Image (cartoon, grey):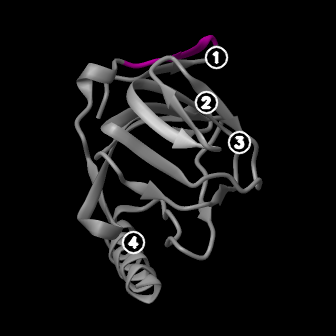
Amino acid sequence: MADVWAAKSGFRANYNDTEWDEKFEFAGGKFSWRKFVSRGGANEPEIFVIKQQPGLVNNRHMHSEGEVQYIIEGSILMDGKEWGAGSFFYNPKEVVYGPLIAGPKGVTYLNIRAKPADIADRTRAPSPKNKENRHVARTELKKTVTKKAVAAK
């Protein structure tokens, strides 16, 4: 975990001190990795970086908290347009958005929320905060996405 300093004056962390700690499989055998800088808490936001393989489709969904996303490298196809490095988005809480499709070189983006949020939709499992249930969520996510992909054929 990152060397984190939090106080009344703010929050400090170094992205380079963290490791890619979560891996999710989506339809078509595509993978997404998540690297937490901060898991959020009373005095700190939830901050993580997502890296996705080219062509990965993240279906329409919403979150229980608003979030800001900033593309570091690669691109995302969203709303009929390809958005590249330097683009940013604000997704309000409980507003459905997507799908997000990773561009031809994949995409890496920063995600910031004021506090941890759960994902809500019918195509993905919830994002529990404790490690024991995270494996179950990943397993359910894989099952759900695979069933949906099979049904679409």
For label 3, the residue is 66
79 left or right of 109 in image = right
- Gap in angstroms between the C-alphas marked 3 and 4: 23 Å
Expressed as whole percent of the image width and height from the top left, the position of residue 137 reads 41, 72
Within-10-Å neighbours for mark 4: few <14, some 14–19, many 20+: few
Q: Main secondary structure of the magenta part?
A: strand
> Is label 2 in contact with label 1 (beta carbons under 8 Å)?
yes
Mark 2–mark 1 distance (CA, rounded to whole Å): 8 Å
Residue lying furthest top: 9
Report the mark closest to the observer, 1 or 3. Answer: 3
Q: Position of residue 68 (x, y in %)?
A: 62, 32
Where is mark 2, residue-wise?
43
Q: CA distance from mark 4 to mark 1?
A: 32 Å
Q: 23 or 97: nearer the eye?
A: 97
Helix, strand or loop under label 1: loop
How far apart marks 2 and 3 lie (CA) works out to 17 Å
Residue 132 at x, y percent in the picture: 34, 70
The residues bearing labels 1 and 3 have C-alpha atoms spaced at a distance of: 22 Å
Task: Specify start and end residues of the magenta stretch as a single range.
Answer: 9-13
